[in-house]
Amino acid sequence: MWLPLSWLHALGAACGYCLVLIPNRARDTTRKNLRACFPQKSDDEISLLTRKSLQNTACTAFEMGKAWLLPVNKTRSLVTQTEGIELFQQALKSGEGVILLAPHLSNFEIFGIYIAKDIESTFLYQPPKIPALDSLLQRTRSRGGIKLAPTNRKGVAQLLTALKNGELVGVLPDQVPTDEGGIYAPFFGEQALTMTLVSKLVRRKKVRVFCGYAERLPKARGFKVIVIEADQAIYSEDLETSVAGLNKTIEQCVERALTQYQWEYKRFRRQPGGKQFYQDAL
């Protein structure tokens, strides 16, 4: 927690390099995902992306002390640049409510703490199975005034209430949902079981949708918070079109910081017809 970012990033780079050399599930899954999503890239390019992705994922892990345990103002001070937040803030001032997508891109914990400053907000989260970890997440994520809603019917009701009150609702949009909570939609050309919650919330309450992340800057210069408006397809009345628009929105952010996305996550583990995607990954 007390080490400077430059030290943490050096540790992350070393750890990520080790993950490339030693056989492990994270390495194999990262490579599998990148190869499937970017078939036009050469083997050397995929290997480089794999190494950099694992290094950035390790950096995110080492940064969690600063995200969770530092005083909130010190955590927010890690953000040194912003882009696109003016339009996002204007939408919030309308009083109609806003949905913010926060994919697993760079340090989403720092992003959430920064973006929710002085804003009435409710963020959806999946409670961990370990009670102690759940308690830690609730305590740390709520430090800046964020209310947490679990991924169940009660949590969805909290989100609807927040939107009706003109507040901010935050969602991690790239987790694999349950069968009843998702449909298949393309994600970088691959079929991915994708949540329908955001599309259904938009149907229920006509609100604007944005997507954002905190990009890790080179040479330990902190983070750049970037917010973009969602692809217009997300507002479609057709559920499949809307969900495809959600994934397209995530893609637009990922393409801007490709190596900072958590490619080690088994995003495609559920496939149509029970097809196995990760049979070669550890």
Image (cartoon, helix red, strand yellow):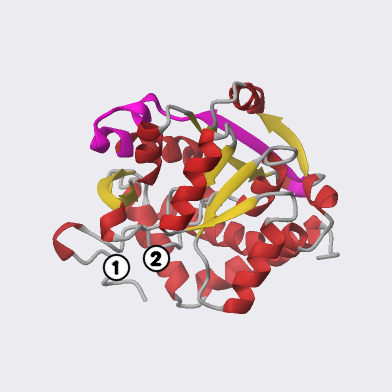
Determine which of the numbered discs, if any, sits on residue 89 in the image: none
Which residue is drawn at the image coordinates 17% and 65% (left, top)?
274
Instruction: State the residue position of label 1.
Output: 278
Residue 238: x %, y % from top left: 24, 31
Residue 225 belongs to the span the image colors magenta: yes
- Please state if 154 lies on the left or on the right of 218 as rendered: left
Q: Pick whichever, 118 or 281, lies toward us.
A: 118
The residue tagged with tag 1: helix, strand or loop? loop
Determine which of the numbered discs, if any, sits on residue 29 in the image: 2
Q: Name the image quarter holding residue 43.
A: bottom left
Q: Pick whichever, 143 or 161, lies toward us.
A: 161
Which residue is drawn at the image coordinates 38% and 34% (left, top)?
204
Rendered-image quadrant of the C terminus: bottom left
- The kind of residue tagged 2 is Thr
- Please state if 137 lies on the left or on the right of 54 as rendered: right
Crowd tier of the residue under label 2, counting other residues whose Cα lies within 10 Å: few below 14, some 14–19, many 20 or above: many
Using the image, determine if residue 27 lies above or below residue 258: below
- Give the residues drawn in magenta, as a range: 219-243
